[in-house]
Image (cartoon, rainbow, N blue to C red):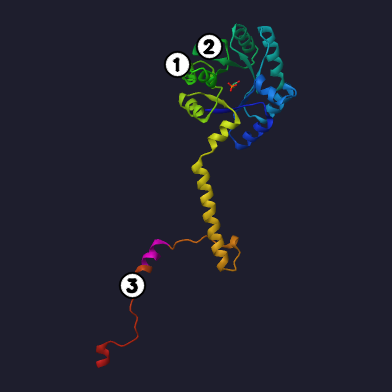
């Protein structure tokens, strides 16, 4: 499963790119409003940092306006994918952009049928919103699972992108459901990295290491960095060491004394 970062924050994108796990980025008007500035400039910077697709979302409500915005976004960088909401004008815009060779991501998908229509219209990414469905007491992951099955059954040329991911369990479930991509906020990635047993294990290893270093440096003039850690002798030597010492008395035996 590919991992996209769900943000317009360039610093977050640079951080996750350094971790070596960044496959793409999704932005939307709400995420952009959190960073401000020029959307075009931010998109160009994001595209420079990102090895894969970067979704830029249109705000027009009509097909002509969507196509115009999308055509403009596509001039900013070769890895731009135009994000278009599910709707009648959205389907028309996706279809027209596909004819122009511009990739699209159909957003705000809440049912498998919506995803099927977007795939037919030529969207290269289908974005079912898992968290927002869970918020209204529905099972968002069911839409991901159903869409993956539809795409695979009919060999549709599109990918299912699990969106509106809210917590690490969503990521595990999206991967198990066969989602081709999941887009995720950096906070969820950080929660995926952490585990209390990993944290306590790292601390214990460091504590034990430091204790050995402290003990060794107290009894030896050798600087700690130059000393090897204390090691048990090999098994053969240990068992030899357990054997009772052979008598090597130099006293002559009784018979020898009689002679
Ligand atoms: C990504 O493409 C979506 O815009 C995003 O995942 C929506 O997430 P939200 O429901 O947390 O706003």
Spatial separation of the CA atoms under disc 1 and disc 3: 74 Å
Q: Position of residue 87 (x, y in %)?
A: 59, 8
Q: Position of residue 229 (x, y in %)?
A: 52, 60
Q: Is residue 237 magenta?
A: yes
According to the picture, the residue beneath numbered tag 2 turns out to be: 114
Q: Main secondary structure of the magenta part?
A: helix
Q: Position of residue 161 (x, y in %)?
A: 55, 21
Quarter of the view holding residue 33? top right
Labels 1 and 3 touching (C-beta < 8 A)? no
Crowd around label 3: few <14 · some 14–19 · many ≥20 (10 Å) = few
According to the picture, the residue beneath numbered tag 1 turns out to be: 153
Is residue 257 left or right of 198 when viewed as pictured? Answer: left
Image: magenta residue range: 234-240
Quarter of the view holding residue 243? bottom left
SS state under label 1: helix
Crowd around label 1: few <14 · some 14–19 · many ≥20 (10 Å) = few
SS state under label 2: helix
Q: Is residue 108 magenta?
A: no
Spatial separation of the CA atoms under disc 2 and disc 1: 17 Å
């Amino acid at each position: 499963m590919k991992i996209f970062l769900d943000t317009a924050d360039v610093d977050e994108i640079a951080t996750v790119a350094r971790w070596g796990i960044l496959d793409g980025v999704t932005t939307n008007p709400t995420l952009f409003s959190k960073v401000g500035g020029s959307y075009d400039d931010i998109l160009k910077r994001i595209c420079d940092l990102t090895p894969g697709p970067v979704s830029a979302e249109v705000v027009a409500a009509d097909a002509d306006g969507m196509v115009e915005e999308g055509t403009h976004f596509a001039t900013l960088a070769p890895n731009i994918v135009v994000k278009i909401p599910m709707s009648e004008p959205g389907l028309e815009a996706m279809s027209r952009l596909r004819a122009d060779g511009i990739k699209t991501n159909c957003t705000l998908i809440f049912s498998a049928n919506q995803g099927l229509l977007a795939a037919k219209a030529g969207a290269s990414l289908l974005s079912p919103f898992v968290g927002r469905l869970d918020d209204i007491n529905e099972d968002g992951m069911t839409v991901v699972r159903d869409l993956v099955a539809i795409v695979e059954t009919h060999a549709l040329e599109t990918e299912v992108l699990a969106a509106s991911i809210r917590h690490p369990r969503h990521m595990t479930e999206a991967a198990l459901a066969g989602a081709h991509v999941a887009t995720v906020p950096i906070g969820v990635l950080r929660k995926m990295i952490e585990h209390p047993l990993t944290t306590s294990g790292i601390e214990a290893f460091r504590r034990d290491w430091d204790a050995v270093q402290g003990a060794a440096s107290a009894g030896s003039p050798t600087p700690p960095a130059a000393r090897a850690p204390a090691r048990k002798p090999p098994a053969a030597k240990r068992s030899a060491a357990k054997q009772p010492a052979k008598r090597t008395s130099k006293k002559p035996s009784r018979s020898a004394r009689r002679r």
